[in-house]
Image: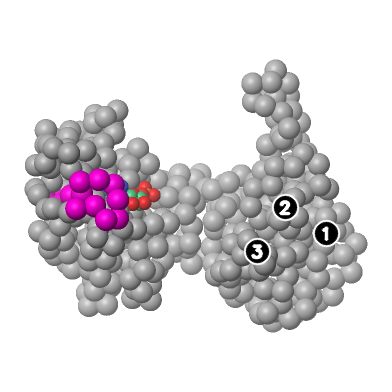
Amino acid sequence: MQLIDNFNFAGKKAIVRVDFNVPLNKETGEVSDDTRIRGALPTIKKIIADGGCAILMSHMGKPKNVDAHAGDPKFSLKQIVPAIEKYLGKIQFAPDCAAASEQAKNLKMGEILLLENLRYYPEEEGKPRGIEKDDPAYEDAKKAMKDSQKKFAKTLASYADVYVNDAFGTAHRKHASTAVIADSFDEANKMFGFLINKEVEAMDKVLKSAQKPFTAIMGGAKVSDKINIINNLLDRVDNLIIGGGMTYTFIKAMGGKIGNSLCEEDRLDVAKEVLAKAKAKGVNLLLPVDAVNADKFDKDANAKVSKTDETPDGWMGLDIADESIKKFSEVIAKSKTVLWNGPMGVFEFDKFAKGTSAIAQAVAKATQENGAFSLIGGGDSVAAINKNKLADKVSYVSTGGGAMLEYMEGKVLPGIAAIRGDK
Ligand code: AMP
């Protein structure tokens, strides 16, 4: 596999898949958070510093237009040009990503060209638009679309000598710009950018070469969303801490009283299987022993503590309580690898945020004081770490969202496989 560190871009045109799907201020259209732009800078700067030029491509939002030329302007990447220029100086813009050959050809070394939103073309995602799935013609349209997706990817590839993928957030999609395009480049001329490299390195450190003891902390709302990750992790971890709403499906499966707490009745068997599998594999599975309960799902609800399996009638568990915090923190403190996905409670309500904050503190402490490698991933645990201002006290905060979760499930990501050849 080609590594960006070893590659010299001098005299080369590089087409770079970045994730510039940034949030915009609804009134002014200005970029309200440029984290993703900043995330791509090391890769772009390396290409330019080597003496190459960069053609940047990205999607923005979910345009649903059928005609590629009638894309909704609210999804236009033109809006973000000033936000990019703030870091990289003057750049050029191509208003039609599939008709940019001339601009690409004329691009001089040291210059940067940004292509218009790839998703103005349905070919990017490879799904036909303007036809419903139950339409008898849908299957044919889908097949035809796969062919046009290949053509579209070839057009994009024709602009450049080298392909760089630095958009981890879309690596779990087999889109023209994230995977199909790679077929047009030989192995020496396709590679990950620095951002994907860092993400993959961090995740592999946890999944493939974790130092022991390895503790995974899984929270969030539902068992059904996390079951595949839990199953994949059970083969790897020493300790599995479960918190958040999914606690109660487990507690009910074990015969506890859960009041009005969140429960997936159709996942009780799944919970039982997880408990049995953990036992068989010698994994220390920890569930909260006590909870902060609410009399309604509201930020101003009354709160009272009970054992997790003795939730009073009419009450629901919305956070882990002190005894659980202590037990979980002790296990985390002794860990050498920690993976955290999902909050321990409804941390959006201050009254029920203490457990999640305490776990964030414990993960940061293990990293700082015990030299643990800690990876935080998944939207809400990232929000929780940021809310507690601890992002720089943990080893890595993944920007991946869905891509990170699928990687953790053990799935092959098309965007990763297209370059690294994962099977
Ligand atoms: P997820 O996206 O699956 O990680 O779930 C995150 C959501 O789970 C957050 O919005 C939390 O408010 C919610 N959550 C966490 N704990 C609970 C709980 N005990 N009851 C209901 N929702 C919860």
Disc nearer the start of the sequence (2/1): 1
Across and down, in percent, residue 386 comes to 39, 69
Secondary structure of the residue carrying numbered label 1? loop
Q: Which one is nearer the viewer's eye here, 399 or 27?
A: 27
Label 3 CB sits under 8 Å from any ligand 1 atom:
no
| Residue 250 makes an appearance in the image | no
Give the label on residue 118, or none.
2
| Front: mark 1 or 3 | 3
Task: Say whether residue 289 is magenta.
Answer: yes
Q: Is residue 120 above or below residue 198?
A: above
Across and down, in percent, residue 45 comes to 66, 78
Badges 2 and 1: C-beta atoms under 8 Å apart? no
Q: How far is mark 1 from mark 3, CA to CA?
A: 23 Å
Q: Residue at x 69, y 24 (%)?
A: 139
Secondary structure of the residue carrying numbered label 2? helix
Q: Which one is nearer the viewer's eye here, 223 or 144?
A: 223
Secondary structure of the residue carrying numbered label 3? loop
In which image quadrant can residue 350 be found? Answer: bottom left
Q: Which residue is mark 3?
A: 27
Across and down, in percent, residue 409 comes to 40, 45
Indicate the quadrant containing the N terminus: top left, top right, bottom left or bottom right. Answer: bottom right
- Dot 3 alpha-carbon crowd within 10 angstroms: few under 14, some 14 to 19, many 20 or more: few
Q: Viewed as shown, does residue 160 lie left or right of 361?
A: right
Q: Which residue is mark 1?
A: 95
Q: Which one is nearer the viewer's eye here, 328 or 373?
A: 328
Q: Amino acid at mark 1?
A: Pro
Q: How far is mark 2 from mark 1, CA to CA?
A: 10 Å
Give the magenta-colored segment's residue range: 288-302
